[in-house]
Amino acid sequence: FPVTIIDADKSKQWLEVKKIRAEKLAKLDSAVFIALENNWTLSDIFKEHRQKLRDIPENFTDPYSVVWPDDLDPFSYYE
């Protein structure tokens, strides 16, 4: 099947979504490492937030309709 301009644009947008998602997860990863080093527990809110980010590719079929979860301060969600 030939690739249409719309398909190419969608593929490009998915790459952008994945890039943004990876950046957001990387910021949260530092909080995970600090929590592990200090034997702290991450809150359920923090865990749910990370899961929502990880699930974006499975929960959205159109990269232009992705709804990002609100950003949170990862260092505020230790228990």
Image: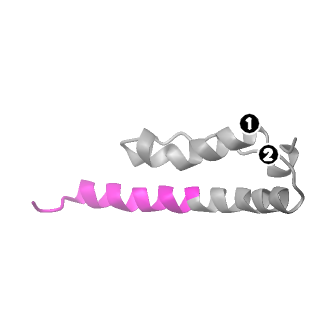
Please tell me whether residue 9 belongs to the stretch shown in magenta: yes
Residue to which mark 1 is pinned: 44
Dot label at residue 42: 2
Side of 64 where 3 appears, left or right: left
Can you tell which quarter of the image residue 5 is in? Answer: bottom left
Could you classify mark 2 by the number of other residues whose Cα lies within 10 Å: few (under 14), some (14-19), or many (20 or more)? some
Q: Nearer the viewer, residue 14 or 28?
A: 28
Can you tell which quarter of the image residue 46 is in? Answer: top right
Give the percent coordinates (x, y) of residue 9. 32, 58
| Secondary structure of the residue carrying numbered label 1 | helix
The type of residue carrying mark 1 is Asp
Residue 70 seen in the current view: no
Side of 19 where 75 appears, left or right: right
Q: Residue furthest front?
A: 39
Q: Reply above or below: 28 against 70.
A: below
Please tell me whether residue 16 belongs to the stretch shown in magenta: yes
Q: Quadrant of the C terminus?
A: top right
| Secondary structure of the residue carrying numbered label 2 | loop
Q: Which residues are magenta?
A: 1-21
- Residue drawn at x 51%, y 44% is 55
- Residue drawn at x 44%, y 39% is 59
Give the percent coordinates (x, y) of residue 31. 79, 57
Q: Nearer the viewer, residue 69 or 76?
A: 76
Residue 56 seen in the current view: yes
The type of residue carrying mark 2 is Leu
